[in-house]
Image: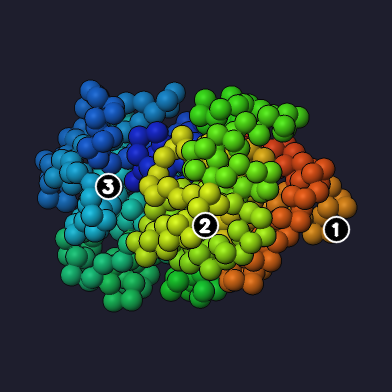
Amino acid sequence: MSLSVLSVASEAVPLVKTGGLADVAGALPAALSAQDVAVTTFIPGYRPVMEKLGKLRSVHKWDALLGKPARLLAGKLGEHKLLVLDAPDYFARDGGPYADASGRDWDDNWHRFAAFARAAADLAGGAVKGRRYDLVHAHDWQSGLLPAYLRFAPVAGSKPVPSIMTIHNMAFQGYYPASIFARLGLPGAAWSVDGVESYAGVGFLKAGMQSASAITTVSPTYAGEIRAPDFGMGLEGIVLARSNRVHGILNGIDPAEWNPANDPHLAQTYGPGQLAKRKRNKRALEAEFGLACDNGPLFVVVSRLTWQKGMDVLLEVLDHLVGIGGRLALLGSGDKAIEQQLHAAAARHPGRIGIRIGYDEALSHQLQGGGDAILVPSRFEPCGLTQLYGLAYGCVPIVSRTGGLADSVIDANPAAIRAGVATGVQMNTVDYQGLAMALSRAVDLFAQPEQWKRLQKNGMTADFSWSASGAAYAALYRQLIKEQA
C-alpha cells in the first residue's frame, strides 16, 4: 500500500542545518521511497531557505496564522515534495533558525514554532486543498505542538490522522511560561498534565510525546536510557507511562553524501580494499591544520564544543594524548571557555594540536577521510552521526558507551577481536580515566597495522545506510495507520 506522509521538521539538508536533525529530515524521503512511502517535507521559510529555493508556487494563504500572515509554498527537495511556510514576521530575519547572530535565542521562538505546528496541523487536517496525508511525522520540540493541535484543535470535520513524535535530543524540550498558553489557539482542555502543561509551564516536546500515536527515538539504546531520570530529563514519567508506544530506530547515513569512494572533498578517494590511499588525505589534513608530519595516530574531532559532547574531558586528556604519540585536529564551536582552552592547548603543543573554530562541511569530510580515529566522548548521544561517518570512512570511532554510540560501534575487546567483528573503541565512563584509557588502547591497536586495518575494513563494510531504518519507519507507519482505521 502506497502511503503519503508529511514530515515536519525545523531544518533539513541541504537547505538549513544546525545538527543531526537536518541530516535525518533530508534523508528520510529517499529512504522511505524504497518502502513505497511518499514523504513531503515541511520546513519554515527562513531567509536563507527562501534565497536558496528562489521562486516557489503559492498553494495556500493564512490571513492570520496565530496572528501573523503566512503563505504555503510548494517546491522540491531533490526528487521529493517540499512545502515551505513563508511567514516573514516569524522567519525572515538574520541569524540562525533559533537564535540571533550573537547566539541568543529569539524571544518569540514559542510563537514561531507554535505557528509552524499549527500550519502543519491544518495541512494534516485537509485545510489545504489537494493536500491529504495518511500520517504526520513530527521532529523535536519545534514540531512538538503538532500532535497536540491534531488532538485538541483539529480542522473542523477532518478525519483523525495518526502521528509520530521523534525525539532527536531530549535535552531540548521547548519549555515556556504558562502565560503563552492563551495565545496558542488551544482549548482549555489542553491545559492539563495529559496535554501541554509541563511543570506549570508549556512543554512543546512534552505535548508531542503526550499526544502522538507513537514516540520514536533515534537509537534503541537511547529509547531505553530515557526511561531513567539521568536521560529522561524530567519527561521520563511519560516515557514509562507510554512505554508500549516508544520505539528506538537507529539513524542511517546517506551514502550519496558520505562515501569515500567518490567524495569530491577528499584529496584522494578510496575504498575498503585501498586503505593505503588514505595516507594522502592524512598528509593533506596535517598541512591544513599545521601539524607535524609523522606516522603516529592522528585523532580528529568534529563536534559541538559542549558539556554534553564531553569536550571538557577532552581538554583534560590532551597532554596525555600528545604524550602517548598522538596528534589532534579539531573542528567545532560552542562554549567560549572551551574554545579558549583548546587554543591554549594548541599553543602549548605546536605541531601536535590544531584547532579550527566554526563549521565547515567540506573540512568535516576531510577530517573523516584523513584522520586515523575520531573521538566522540559524549555523556549522552541519542544517535550520533559522526561515528557512523567515521565507520564509513575507515576513521576508527572512539566513543562512550551510550545511546546510538553503543548501538553502532563494536568495542575492540579480546572476544570481538578474535571473532573479527570489532569496529572501534568504547569507554565506560566519560572522565579523565575513561578517555585516557580509551586513547591508550587506540594507540596500542594502531601499533598493530593488520589489526587496525581490520577495524577499518569492518567499519567500512558495515551497512549503516537508511535501508534498515527506512523499513522500520515504514513498518511503524503502517501499523499506526492500521490501528487508526
Disc 1 marks a residue whose amino acid type is Ala
Q: Quadrant of residue 148?
A: bottom left
Image quadrant in which you'd find residue 133: top left
Q: Residue at x 23, y 55 (%)?
A: 102
Classify residue 285 by image quadrant.
top right
Q: Nearer the viewer, mark 2 or mark 3?
A: 2
Secondary structure category for the residue under label 2: loop
Depth check, front residue: 479 or 184: 184
Disc assigned to residue 475 = none
Task: Out of 34 and 210, give the one closest to the viewer.
Answer: 34
Residue found at x 34% / y 61%: 336
The mark that comes first in sequence, 1 or 2, is 2
Q: Are marks 1 and 2 in contact (CB under 8 Å)?
A: no
Residue at 64% across, 72% down: 433
Q: In the rendering, at what x and y percent does residue 165 appear?
A: 44, 54
SS for dot 3 = loop
Is the N terminus in the top left, top right, bottom left or bottom right quadrant? top right
How far separated are the C-alphas under marks 2 and 3? 34 Å
| Coordinates of residue 57 in the picture (x, y in percent) | 24, 24
Residue type, mark 2 in image: His
Q: Amino acid at mark 3?
A: Gly
Q: Are marks 2 and 3 in contact (CB under 8 Å)?
A: no
Q: Which residue is mark 1?
A: 415
- Crowdedness of circle 1 by 10 Å Cα count: few (<14), some, many (20+)? few
Provide the secondary structure element on which disc 1 rests. helix
Residue labelled with disc 3: 96
Give the spatial CA distance, label 1 vs label 2: 37 Å
What residue sits right under mark 2 in the picture?
349
Q: Nearer the viewer, residue 161 or 410?
A: 410
